[in-house]
Image (cartoon, grey):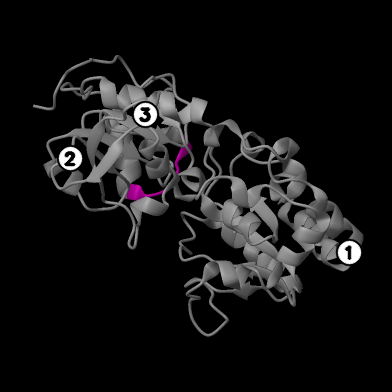
Amino acid sequence: METVRPKLKIAFVDFWENFTPEKCFLAQQIQKLCHVEISDQPDVVFYSDAQSQHHRQIDAKRVFVAIEDRVPNYRVCDYSFTFRDMEDDRNLRLPFYVVISDGPAALIKGSEAEEARLRGERRRFCAFVASNANPRRTARRLSIFHKLRAERHVDSGGRAFNNVGGPVEDKDAFLRGARFNLALENYASPGYTTEKIYQAMLARCIPIYWGNPDIAQDFNPASFINVADFASDAEAVEYIVAADRDEALQAQYHREPFFPDNEPTKYFRDDYLLPQLEKIFSEPKRRRSRFYVGDIVYDLRKRWGFHAPFLDPNRKLGPRFANEEVE
């Protein structure tokens, strides 16, 4: 007998421009538990890192969904999905590439013939798409880009260092013309895996990655080039240039599955995400009414917009005060 799913009114606010809930993996998972109605008067509101503060005006249970490596402010939200594994049951690690994906199917590799068809002909060496070129916030990424560009032409399709006639409208199509893609995070922080490497894999480029030191918990390390594996950026660049001349080495990367054993990681499994969603929907609000030092960390990182190691809070964000409301 089919289980009757309850009705739930939800809202997605303060996300990025052109955000479409129906194409969001998180929203797709919610549909497995409830009959969802998108409402201006929701029972649960999901909000993100955008500068808008619209979520604060909504009287509902609030869930923070991180698109950058920011600490949740539990005076504002009741639960959170972030890049971090935290010793707090209000939070679940759900990296941004999972949130925006349409599920894991597109990264499950097929036969060699099918993969060769998906790759097609690649006329360009390497693609790079970035908007943020602030040297204070993205110093390592800029260093890697400039060192590689000094050796070979790199097609830059973002607002930063654009050399293709303007920002590209279709990033996926742009990446599909290149053999490699510079998929470099803004900074390196444990757990911080954004959409960059995921999009490179979707386009069947060989990703050149730098960022999350624990990237192996997300993807098979043998399927991409990790700059962190080399003694220096210059050594990594030398290897990349050599790899572009070595078709056998490229074929070796292409044979490797993106996921270990070509099976989706736990972040895409129902038994990982659905229990947390069930808890969020069934338990009461859990926002704190008292101040905690971690709130200073949140505010500073939100204002400065980049990762500073000395602002790392303790893994446990402090005592929990169940059922408390923001005063």
The residue beneath circle 3 is 277
The residue beneath circle 2 is 42
| Mark nearer the N terminus (3 vs 2) | 2
Tell me the kind of residue under disc 1. Glu
Which residue is at the far bottom?
A: 165
Residue span colored magenta: 304-309
Name the spot of residue 290 as percent of width and height, x first: 17, 21
| Mark nearer the N terminus (1 vs 2) | 2
Secondary structure, mark 3, is helix
Asked if labels 1 and 3 touch by Cβ distance under 8 angstroms, the answer is no
Q: Nearer the viewer, residue 2 or 32?
A: 2
Tell me the kind of residue under disc 3. Leu
Q: Nearer the viewer, residue 139 or 260?
A: 260
Q: Which of 255 and 135 is in front in this view?
A: 255
Secondary structure, mark 1, is helix
Q: How far apart are marks 3 and 2 (CA)?
A: 15 Å
> Looking at the image, which residue is at 30% across and 48% down?
303
Tell me the kind of residue under disc 2. Pro
Q: Which image quarter: residue 293?
A: top left
